[in-house]
């Protein structure tokens, strides 16, 4: 029996919706999107690691993996991934505390087949015993991969210090130890777990397609009606996540990376029933304020903390943790008790003066505007979001629930804020050099748990708000009414509206999305921006100092729906401003005025310097494959540098040197910009005039800087070995195109599309070389390229290279055996991905800005690549692979790292790259763009 319920939608939403419940109690939302380039499906089930048997931690996660590896109707373990990849889609899944979610996208012509394959996960999975053995090795590789990730390590301490009778305490990932035993026995446990817990009445489904709602409804009935409804009810133990024995504790954790964080958390009951009024969101909004006089502002003035975030924390069926996170200074570490005290004082101030209707309405109106002018998301993201929201909201609020703030119910707010007290509080201090006496079981995290002292309890209970802190005033950036301006400009691509030596500005008035929002990009090239590692370091230091200096001046704007981002590029920096257009110019002028100042304080300089040094130094603690990605660009691009090189240069930097660098940076610049969105041409011209005038005051015009890339033509295999302290090995292989034309773009991108699924299936699923296995199309400085990578806990880099080379040789031989139909579908899948309709203003702006950076001034590169793709045959691709990837002494860069303490001979034949990377780049031939 079907039932329908209306869904509250945004006035700006062009899509059509239908909700229904199948006879098996499966709840479904259907979404008809005529602009969708890809169709999508997502199913979320109310089963997660809270449901793991005590004897089998990680079972829910293991099951999630196994469902992709064959069903009775489609038994081939690699067929689903291959099918999706061939048809231009993607798929993934995640396992959380109480939910597991599966999602996939694909080109519309293959959507019917996708639904057939996808639905079989929940109807008749195989759980092949041989694959059980393989996939638990993959689970163990995933566990091993993240052994040195602080987030996982800290999360485990939260579990170990919780009530061990609560399911939150369970180890969620799984490994060979928790999944040990005979494969057939483990298979039977998987089957039992699946049969006992996976039921249609615990599932929610979302389908997004350009097909009509009527067609989608038929597909939903056809493919998902056969999921069994076992009429299950969730039954978790009625125990507190943190009992009295776990409250009023100071938990000290030693991280691997250099960091100093304090979390003040309070345990509340589940608050889902308040989603229509969101009192905790309101309280969090007041606590997280960053204006002058705020809690964060006070802590910054005291040099105790530099960042605050409020409102996060773990949550579950019977609890909600309200957490306030601080990034501490060295002085802050010495004043933990005072930071806690002033936080409690601010909470008391909120209780006494903050719960006012006008403050609530400010926040509610911002959410209302965000909903009314929300921009469409990609179909896959939308499907995932809706299927999960269906687990929490009624049909009508599946879209609106996250934005809904109906009214301030003071009793609700007072009830919640009254629980933010010492008796429900826990402190977590994350820092090096603390006394510890415990080690966590799975991730070997060193920690200690101390009771609050009597002196602390007295200090934190007898409080009065100090005069230096106060609640925020009315936000000047908030707009009462904001509407888009409709125009009929003839142009559909950006046009240059201002150009002179050292400056060029593009403009395009959006006429499709019709939201009162826009994006402004400004790239500033400077001769001093990154001409050396030290100059590049100083530019990054300047950006961090500027962002820090802007915080109090721009926080109100960000709350009101405006945003900005300042980031380095190879020749300088880029400023990106976004959000509602009426106030964007005001924010832009604030940023520019602050960027011109040369009066950074010594105190803030010392802190930012330490923070940045820690951040760069911590790169050495990330997973090996991430470090290889970073090392590749530093190896190949003349003006890209290693984070550890930056850290070394930073040690001797002074404030005077930074001020001098800022002066030098702006002496001669080239500025290129794009203004896109709900900006009229005359407004863009006014902005152009203002910026041009400012540039004449501070800078001389310069030519655009060249971007230089190492040319590896005729150099054979170049090998760079990195020393990385990690238990895993890793390899990354990079192949480079000599040309930047659209034919080479088509060849390299099609190669990645065609080979990625087979590469993953053979080396990850079949050979079990590691959990992180993949390929990517990677253009550097407009030169197309492709990378192959693996991170492995057991196989050395030389062996990995041999296996990758063997795979490439085998693939080149078998490529011609692929049917013409399959080859055409592979190409069409890539074409659809390239030409997919951009769902929102942000995505469109990113493509236009990227086109300008790539000198694609007629904005037709996509179309030209597609025309090239249509002409490429299997014979062309086989010849390309043979010439480029498998010939003896082919040109490539191989980056490797060996596991800590590995004494095996792992040498790779090839020319070793000079340990002095700067020397290597300077003595190499280079492409100049």
Image (tube, rainbow, N blue to C red):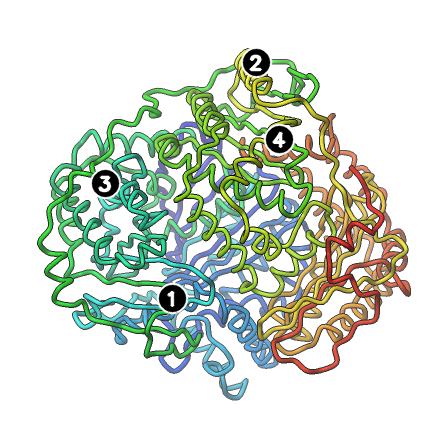
Query: Residue placed at 77% from the left, 75% from the top?
Result: 907
**Which one is earlier in the sequence, the residue at label 2 or at label 3?**
3
> Quarter of the image holding residue 431?
bottom left
Q: Position of residue 110 (x, y in %)?
A: 65, 49
- Check the picture and name the quadrant holding the C terminus: top right
**Which one is earlier in the sequence, the residue at label 2 or at label 4?**
4
Q: Secondary structure at mark 3?
A: loop
State the CA–CA distance, disc 4 to disc 3.
45 Å
Outermost residue, bottom side = 182
Q: Nearer the viewer, mark 1 or mark 4?
A: 4
Q: Which residue is mark 2?
A: 689
State the CA–CA distance, disc 2 to disc 3.
46 Å
**Which one is earlier in the sequence, the residue at label 1 or at label 2?**
1
Q: Position of residue 94 (x, y in %)?
A: 48, 61
Q: Is residue 7 left or right of residue 206?
A: left
Q: Which mark is residue 524?
A: 4
Q: Is residue 536 above or below residue 883?
A: above
Q: Secondary structure at mark 1?
A: helix
Q: Nearer the viewer, mark 4 or mark 3?
A: 4
Q: Which residue is mark 1?
A: 155
> Quarter of the image holding residue 740?
top right
Give the number of marks. Answer: 4
**Which one is earlier in the sequence, the residue at label 4 or at label 3?**
3
Seen from the viewer's position, the closer of residues 331 and 477 is 331
């Amino acid at each position: 029996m079907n039932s329908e319920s209306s869904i509250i939608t945004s006035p700006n939403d062009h899509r059509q919706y239908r909700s229904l419940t199948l006879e098996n109690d499966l709840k479904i939302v259907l979404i008809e999107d005529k602009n969708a380039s890809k169709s999508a499906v997502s199913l979320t089930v109310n089963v997660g690691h809270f449901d793991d048997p005590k004897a089998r931690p990680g079972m829910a996660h293991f099951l999630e993996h196994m469902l992709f590896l064959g069903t009775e109707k489609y038994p081939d373990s690699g067929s689903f991934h291959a099918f999706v990849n061939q048809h231009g889609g993607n798929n993934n899944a995640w396992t959380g505390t109480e939910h597991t979610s599966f999602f996939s996208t694909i080109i519309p012509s293959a959507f019917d087949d996708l639904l057939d394959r996808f639905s079989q996960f929940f109807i008749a999975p195989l759980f092949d015993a041989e694959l059980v053995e393989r996939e638990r090795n993959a689970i163990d590789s995933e566990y091993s991969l993240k052994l040195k990730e602080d987030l996982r390590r800290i999360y485990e301490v939260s579990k170990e210090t919780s009530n061990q009778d609560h399911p939150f305490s369970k180890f969620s990932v799984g490994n060979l130890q928790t999944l040990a035993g005979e494969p057939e026995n483990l298979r039977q446990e998987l089957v039992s777990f699946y049969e006992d817990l996976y039921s249609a009445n615990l599932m929610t489904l979302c389908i997004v397609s350009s097909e009509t709602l009527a067609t989608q409804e038929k597909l939903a009935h056809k493919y998902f009606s056969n999921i069994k409804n076992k009429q299950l009810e969730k039954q978790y133990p009625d125990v507190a996540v943190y009992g009295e024995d776990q409250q009023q504790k100071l938990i000290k954790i030693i991280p691997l990376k250099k960091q100093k964080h304090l979390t003040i958390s309070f345990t509340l009951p589940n608050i889902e029933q308040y989603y229509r009024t969101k009192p905790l969101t309101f309280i969090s909004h007041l606590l997280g304020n960053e204006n002058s006089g705020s809690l964060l502002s006070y802590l910054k003035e005291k040099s105790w903390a530099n960042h605050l975030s409020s409102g996060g924390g773990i949550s579950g069926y019977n609890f909600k943790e309200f957490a306030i996170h601080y990034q501490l200074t060295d002085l802050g570490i010495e004043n933990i008790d005072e930071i806690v005290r002033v936080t409690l004082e601010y909470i008391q101030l909120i209780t006494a003066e903050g719960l006012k209707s006008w403050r609530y309405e400010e926040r509610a109106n911002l959410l209302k505007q965000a909903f009314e002018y929300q921009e469409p998301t990609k179909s896959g993201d939308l499907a995932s979001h809706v299927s999960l929201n269906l687990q929490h909201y009624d049909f009508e609020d599946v879209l609106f629930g996250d934005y809904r703030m109906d009214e301030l119910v003071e009793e609700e707010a007072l009830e919640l804020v009254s629980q933010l007290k010492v008796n429900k509080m826990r402190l977590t201090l994350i820092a090096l050099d603390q006394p510890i006496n415990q080690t966590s079981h799975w991730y070997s995290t060193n920690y200690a748990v101390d009771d609050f002292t009597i002196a602390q309890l007295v200090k934190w209970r007898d409080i009065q708000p100090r005069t230096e802190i106060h609640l925020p005033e009315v936000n000047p950036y908030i707009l009462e009414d904001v509407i888009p301006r409709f125009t009929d400009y003839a142009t559909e691509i950006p046009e240059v509206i201002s150009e002179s030596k050292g400056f060029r500005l593009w403009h395009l008035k959006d006429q499709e999305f019709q939201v009162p929002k826009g994006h402004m990009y400004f790239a500033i090239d400077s001769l001093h921006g990154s001409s050396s590692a030290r100059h590049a370091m100083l530019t990054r230091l300047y950006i961090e100092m500027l962002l820090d200096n802007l915080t109090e001046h721009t926080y109100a704007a960000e709350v009101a729906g405006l945003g900005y981002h300042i980031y380095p590029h190879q020749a300088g920096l880029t400023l990106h401003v976004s959000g509602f257009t009426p106030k964007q110019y005001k924010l832009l002028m604030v940023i520019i005025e602050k960027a011109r100042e040369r009066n950074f304080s010594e105190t803030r300089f010392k802190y930012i310097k330490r923070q940045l040094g820690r951040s760069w130094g911590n790169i050495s603690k990330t997973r090996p494959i991430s470090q290889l990605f970073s090392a590749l660009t530093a190896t190949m691009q003349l003006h890209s540098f290693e984070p550890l090189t930056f850290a070394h240069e930073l040690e001797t930097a002074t404030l005077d040197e930074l001020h001098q660098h800022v002066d030098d940076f702006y002496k001669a610049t080239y500025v290129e910009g794009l203004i896109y969105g709900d900006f009229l041409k005359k407004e863009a011209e006014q902005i152009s005039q203002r910026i041009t005038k400012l540039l004449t005051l501070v800078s001389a015009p310069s030519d655009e800087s060249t971007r230089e890339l190492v040319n590896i033509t005729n150099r054979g295999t170049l090998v760079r070995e990195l020393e990385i302290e990690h238990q895993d090995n890793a390899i990354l292989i990079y192949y480079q195109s000599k040309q930047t034309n659209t034919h080479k773009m088509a060849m390299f991108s099609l190669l990645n599309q065609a080979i990625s699924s087979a590469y993953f299936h053979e080396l990850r699923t079949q050979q079990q070389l590691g959990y992180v296995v993949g390929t990517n199309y990677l253009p550097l400085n407009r030169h197309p390229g492709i990378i192959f990578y693996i991170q492995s806990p057991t196989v050395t880099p030389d062996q990995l290279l041999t296996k990758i080379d063997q795979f490439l040789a085998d693939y080149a031989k078998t490529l011609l055996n692929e049917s013409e139909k399959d080859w055409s579908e592979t190409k069409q899948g890539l074409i659809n991905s390239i030409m997919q309709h951009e769902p929102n203003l942000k995505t469109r702006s990113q493509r236009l800005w990227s086109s300008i950076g790539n000198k694609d001034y007629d904005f037709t590169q996509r179309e030209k690549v597609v025309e090239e793709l249509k002409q490429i045959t299997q014979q062309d691709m086989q010849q390309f692979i043979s010439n480029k990837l498998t010939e003896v002494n082919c040109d490539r860069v191989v980056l490797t790292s060996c596991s800590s303490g590995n004494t095996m001979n792992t040498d790779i034949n090839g020319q070793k790259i000079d340990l002095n990377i700067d020397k290597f780049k300077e003595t190499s031939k280079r492409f100049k763009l």
